[in-house]
Image (spheres, helix red, strand yellow):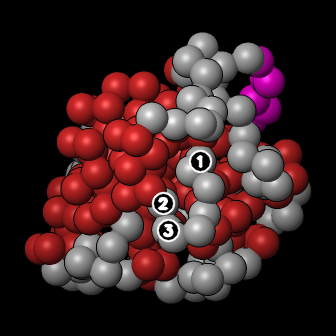
């Protein structure tokens, strides 16, 4: 799973930003953190970036019914399955350690499966299976749904489905626009063979 490095099709905006663009970018990032390339690309269509703000903020907030660890497993697996090294790298760099994903689990989320020995928690395995099923079939079988319903609340299940879909959309944008990796982000190759 190697991503070829090419020039972006839509170059992320660079400073200085107009007041409107600067204000939107500041809403999209934690205080004091420079805006990532994805967000600097989104603001090329300011009304779209503004509209996405509320949903994106929800997906990464404590209002999401899934735990931060659940969220990151879903995001990392979704981005890896979509071949989106850019967004996968952003999330691994910023969140993997915070949610206690170890090197073997990161490698498994990237190229392995829910059957890998590093997954001892049924909840984690079900999240991976759900993402794989949604990615491969755009559906979840009755058997998998029943297993998930025994572990996750209705709110969890809805959040999982939409989180996976949201990061498919993010992956489509990042890959199709050929976003360059963020400085210091891990790569798929950097976690290969860690299982």
The answer to whether residue 81 is visible is no
Q: Earlier in the sequence, mark 1 or mark 2?
A: 2
Q: Secondary structure at mark 3?
A: loop
Label 2, residues with CA under 10 Å away: few <14, some 14-19, many ≥20: some
On screen, residue 182 versus residue 194, left or right, reads left
Whether residue 120 is situated above or below residue 147 in the rendered picture: below
For the record, the magenta segment spans 1-6
Quarter residue 154 falls in = bottom left
Disc number at residue 29? 2
Q: Quadrant of the N terminus?
A: top right
Residue drawn at the location 40% of the way across and 41% of the way down: 19
Disc number at residue 55? none
Residue to which mark 1 is pinned:
36
Quarter residue 3 falls in = top right
Mark 1–mark 2 distance (CA, rounded to whole Å): 8 Å
The majority secondary structure of the magenta stretch comes to loop
Q: Secondary structure at mark 1?
A: loop
Residue drawn at the location 71% of the way across and 33% of the way down: 180
Give x and y (percent) for residue 133: 37, 47
Mark 3–mark 1 distance (CA, rounded to whole Å): 11 Å
Give x and y (percent) for residue 104: 76, 71
């Amino acid at each position: 799973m190697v991503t070829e490095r090419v020039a972006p099709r839509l170059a992320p905006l660079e400073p200085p930003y107009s007041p409107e663009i600067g204000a939107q970018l500041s809403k999209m990032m934690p205080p004091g953190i420079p805006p990532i390339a994805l967000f600097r690309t989104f603001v090329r269509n300011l009304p779209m970036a503004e509209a996405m703000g509320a949903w994106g903020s929800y997906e990464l907030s404590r209002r999401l019914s899934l735990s931060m660890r659940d969220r990151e497993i879903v995001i990392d697996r979704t981005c890896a399955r979509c071949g989106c090294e850019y967004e996968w790298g952003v999330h691994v760099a910023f969140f993997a350690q915070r949610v206690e994903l170890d090197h073997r689990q990161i490698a498994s989320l990237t190229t392995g499966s829910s059957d890998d020995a590093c997954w001892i928690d049924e909840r984690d395995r079900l999240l991976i299976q759900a993402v794989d099923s949604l990615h491969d079939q755009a559906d979840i079988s009755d058997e998998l749904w029943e297993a998930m319903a025994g572990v996750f609340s209705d709110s969890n299940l809805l959040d999982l489905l939409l989180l996976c879909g949201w990061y498919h959309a993010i992956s489509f944008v990042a890959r199709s626009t050929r976003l360059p990796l963020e400085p210091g982000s891990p790569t798929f190759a950097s976690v290969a063979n860690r299982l």
